[in-house]
Image (spheres, rainbow, N blue to C red):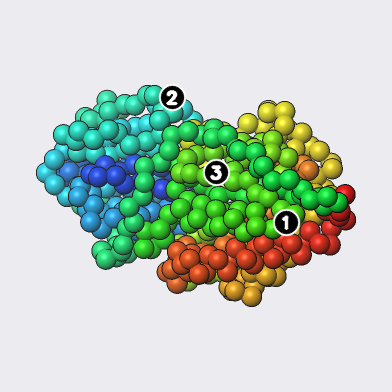
């Protein structure tokens, strides 16, 4: 039977990103999939459960990493379980702690099912519903859904596999409410170049933000907070250089679409672009730093391809699709001059990677390449730095340590300065 299931799921839909946001007694589940799916959401009684059935969806490492995201101290939800329900259906079950009936809101009515968003709260909750403010529609699902066949609350209707126990002692830092603006203007730097010197402007991009928290560590750290802290420190160090200045693509907890990040860098006439991220994997032993550049001819490894696919999908969290019909982005994809820019990106990436190797293990000893949307500027050398694995407890602690952040920032800047010193385009005016 297991062999048959594995064969049936060979061409199944893959979950690219999986996030579980929690606020008070509410929870908001977001799944990004690589193609549209058929799904059903309903509740079961005795005891109360919320069930999500998804047709032809593989139980991937990304999906398996979802249950540990549930806070063990959540006041309303006891457990999340994921397992095959039938040969072609994957089932997610939220167990409810109390005897208060769940209120389930499907945020996807009338939209592409590449993005699946479900909110769960007590039916008596007075808290404002979680979810993207851009979504103006919702549909309350009751036990007796018209298009849902009757489900028996027997053990056979439950997933058969139990996820690993969640660490009840995990610390969860209090996050400030995300800012709502997705179009924060960039303040133009006032720094002036010294006589005979070229002033280099570097766009520093803190990955994720707002309703897109990015990856989450075992101790509750959110990638969006770590990347912003590192980006701010990097800007401070860059601004201290005589011939450099930095602009922050995101200087707060708000969502910025990937295409807008590129546009903001170009609007600021940036000479270089550095995107800061923190990697994650279902296996907590994965560790090390990586540097990526753009590729238009395929990824250099399966890992690079997967990471680019995952990072490019984050626009869907904010309800924004990457619009390849946009003229700027279309020119970006087609402009042959980008070949030279990619070459310069790899050179800068090598210099940065060499410096990072002195302070942390490298996950890859080479600059990897893949089709990252955020790196697709035709005339700005751009790199994406995966600072460490937030899913590794040891590296998560490092990423939250001011001393390590300072070392990381110094390594990145040292690499950039080395690249600039050997690049004729940055010679004195």
| Mark 3 or 2, nearer chain start | 2
Expressed as whole percent of the image width and height from the top left, the position of residue 426 reads: 83, 53
Answer above or below: position of 424 versus 314: below
Expressed as whole percent of the image width and height from the top left, the position of residue 73 reads: 23, 56
Answer above or below: position of 285 versus 368: below
Answer above or below: position of 336 versus 356: above
Q: Report, in whole angstroms, how far the alpha carbon at label 2 lies from the one at label 1.
A: 54 Å
Residue 240 seen in this snapshot = yes
Residue 142 relative to residue 288: left or right: left
Q: What residue is pinned by disc 1? A: 242
Q: Report, in whole angstroms, how far the alpha carbon at label 3 lies from the one at label 2.
A: 31 Å
Q: Residue at x 84, y 58 (%)?
A: 423
Q: Residue at x 17, y 43 (%)?
A: 48
Residue 110 has which mark?
2
- Residue furthest toward the front? 195
The residue mark sitting in front, 1 or 3, is 1
Q: Residue at x 70, y 70 (%)?
A: 354
| Mark 2 or 1, nearer chain start | 2
Residue 200 relative to residue 323: left or right: right
Q: What residue is pinned by disc 3? A: 250
């Amino acid at each position: 039977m297991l062999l048959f299931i594995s064969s049936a799921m060979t061409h199944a839909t893959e979950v690219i990103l999986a996030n579980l946001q929690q606020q008070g007694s509410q929870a908001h589940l977001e799944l990004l999939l690589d193609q549209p799916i058929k799904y059903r959401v309903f509740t079961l009684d005795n005891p109360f459960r919320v069930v999500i059935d998804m047709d032809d969806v593989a139980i991937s490492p990304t999906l398996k990493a979802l249950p540990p995201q549930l806070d063990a101290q959540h006041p309303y939800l006891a457990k999340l379980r994921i397992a095959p329900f039938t040969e072609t259906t994957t089932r997610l079950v939220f167990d409810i702690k109390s005897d208060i009936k769940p209120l389930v809101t499907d945020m996807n009515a009338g939209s592409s099912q590449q993005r699946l968003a479900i909110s769960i709260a007590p039916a008596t909750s007075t808290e404002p519903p979680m979810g993207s403010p851009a979504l103006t529609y919702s549909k309350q699902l009751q036990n007796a859904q018209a298009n849902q066949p009757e489900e028996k609350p027997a053990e056979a209707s439950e997933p058969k596999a139990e996820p690993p126990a969640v660490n009840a002692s995990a610390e969860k830092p209090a996050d400030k409410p995300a800012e709502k603006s997705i179009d924060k203007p960039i303040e133009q730097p006032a720094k002036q170049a010294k006589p005979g010197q070229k002033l280099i402007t570097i766009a520093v991009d803190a990955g994720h933000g707002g309703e897109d928290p990015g990856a989450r560590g075992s101790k509750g750290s959110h990638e969006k907070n770590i990347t912003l802290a590192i980006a701010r420190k990097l800007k401070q160090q860059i601004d201290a250089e005589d011939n450099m200045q930095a602009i922050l693509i995101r200087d707060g907890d708000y969502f910025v679409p990937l295409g807008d990040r590129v546009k903001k860098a170009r609007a600021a006439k940036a000479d270089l672009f550095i995107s800061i991220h923190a990697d994650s994997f279902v296996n907590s032993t994965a560790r090390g730093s990586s540097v990526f550049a753009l590729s238009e001819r395929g990824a250099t490894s399966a890992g690079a391809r997967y990471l680019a696919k995952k990072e490019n999908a984050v626009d869907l969290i904010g309800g924004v699709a990457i619009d390849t019909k946009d003229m700027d982005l279309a020119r970006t994809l087609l402009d042959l001059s980008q070949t030279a820019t990619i070459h310069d990106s790899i050179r800068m990436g090598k210099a940065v990677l060499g410096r990072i190797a002195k302070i942390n293990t490298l996950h890859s000893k080479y600059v990897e390449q893949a089709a990252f949307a955020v790196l697709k500027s035709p005339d700005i050398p751009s790199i994406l730095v995966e600072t460490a694995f937030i899913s590794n407890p040891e590296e998560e602690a490092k990423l939250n340590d001011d001393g390590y952040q300072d070392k990381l920032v110094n390594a990145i800047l040292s690499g950039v300065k080395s690249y600039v010193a050997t690049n004729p385009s940055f010679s004195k005016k």
